[in-house]
Image: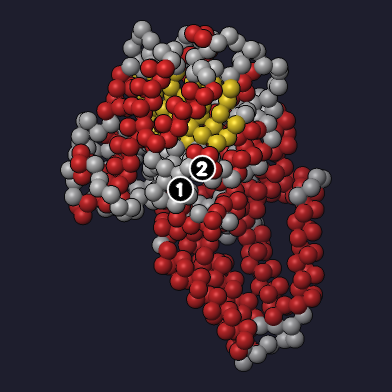
Amino acid sequence: MAAFQTATGFILVAVAWLMPRRVAGARLGPALPLDAAPFVVGAVLLTAMSGRPLFAGVVVFALGAGFTLADRTTRATLREPIVFQATSEFLQVFSHPQLYLPFAGPALVLGGAAAAALAAAALLVFAPPVWTPVPLRGVGAVAAIAFAVWAIGRPPLLNGFAFLCRRLGPSGDPSADAANLGPFAMLLVHCALAKSERPARQGALRPSLAPPVVRGVGDRAAPLVVVQCESFFDARRLSPLLPPDLLPGFAECCGAAAMCGRLEVPGWGANTMRSEFAVLTGIAETELGYDRFNPYYALARVPIASHVWRLRQAGYRTICLHPFARRFFRRDLVMPALGFEQFLGCEVLGGSKVPPYQSDPELARHVLRVLDVEGPQTLIFVITMGNHGPWLDRGGPIDRIVAGCFEPESVPQGAELLRYLDGLRRSDEMLQALMGGLAERHPGARLMFYGDHLPSLPRAFDYFGFTEPHSDYAIWPGRDRGPAQTDLPAHRIGGAFVDLALGSCHEAASPAPAPPAV
């Protein structure tokens, strides 16, 4: 019996390690011990504390299977593997499961977790220990490992470990490194390199906190509104089946815009914070090293130079509106670091933390109300939530223009696509309400509207042969000239918008000031 438990537990641990390596297409190499270390250490500790190698094997297998499912889902829905910053979102799976579980399959996730928990509990109760359990030694070993990890995370040990990680030859591309190093070695190497580089990068990107320049009010102080619209792009590009009048507000906005075009965003299907950080700061992701996968994870927890600080120093009141939990992505820490004086979440704006979220037209009314209270010398940055995926059946009739595009059964993910397009119509209504409200209140106002990323509808896009990764943007109005059709990366439009707003640049496609290189 002891031999059976030991052999079976060993096999389960080996399979748990090999499953994510298979998904990653991992090859043999010098990082093999580092990639296997989490599984070996976990199995040894659990065996020592329980005396049951089969129990340890079941627990490690369940964790490996869960990671494999998450990694496969991430690759399918986001076109990239799990990156090390995803650990910061682990608790959000429990606090906001509606944002994560539908993509992996709730029945599979919950059923698998329940089965693993029952199996582990049964082994603890009914399986006899092979060795005498030493739980106190196990706890001591866990404490020692935690201390070692903490010590390695502090200079100079961190710098030494980062040097060894560089010797493994990481490319910085998570997909390539997961294949060359192994998925877990990739996570450890990327985390160590990011942590070692971060202090110097934060110091170089610190804003110059000069006293604000108090500008006059009235005509010279036009309000500025920036809308980051969830999953927005001009879906008329997707297929001829979609009618030309699908987005009348966006068409009107582009026709009267100073600039409009495709927006090159640093993510597909999710990772809003990447586009958000790029637009607000003007910093290209190539300047962020390994922190580019989630600048909010640690980099932007200290003041970072941004266009928000630039406007604040020009005398603008800076406010962020987001009808969702302020702590999501830890925006409650990041927004002040990027220069916002006030951050209003669902606690003030209302809106549900579960679908259906606050609609975009309702959020437009909040924007205009805040502008009426704060006055013209105000920047309002809006993060919408109304069209956030997954696009499941949430009741209510679909807009008739959208419903007539195609039969949902005829297109893969057709029902989800129709729900998404219906959400686009609501976003378009928001844009029309903002243009009308701003024109009525402040003729000199400026509005920038853009999509943070494309929606994660991979099977529907494949059906239509749509491979473009870019969203769309418009900077409105164009005053006396026609729109400049200019495709830009996300880190360029913030600077272009502020230059137009402050009158400091007459070249529409001028780049934002580049941050210091590190």
Q: Nearer the viewer, residue 175 or 371?
A: 371
Residue 483: name its quadrant. Answer: top left
**Which residue is depicted at the point 49% across and 39% down?**
349
Tags 2 and 1 in contact by the CB under 8 Å rule? yes
Circle 2 packing at 10 Å, graded few (<14), some (14-19), many (20+), is some
Image-based side of 436 in relation to 180, left or right: left
Image coords of residue 277 (percent x, y): 55, 33
Q: Which mark is residue 202?
A: none
Q: Which residue is mark 1?
A: 352
What secondary structure is found at the residue carrying circle 1? loop
Image coords of residue 187 (percent x, y): 61, 53
The image quadrant where one finds the C terminus is top right
Q: Which residue is mark 2?
A: 346
Q: Measure the alpha-carbon separation of dots 2 and 1.
A: 7 Å
Q: Nearer the viewer, residue 330 or 184?
A: 330
**Which residue is depicted at the point 44% across and 12% down?**
444
**Which residue is depicted at the point 45% across and 44% down?**
351
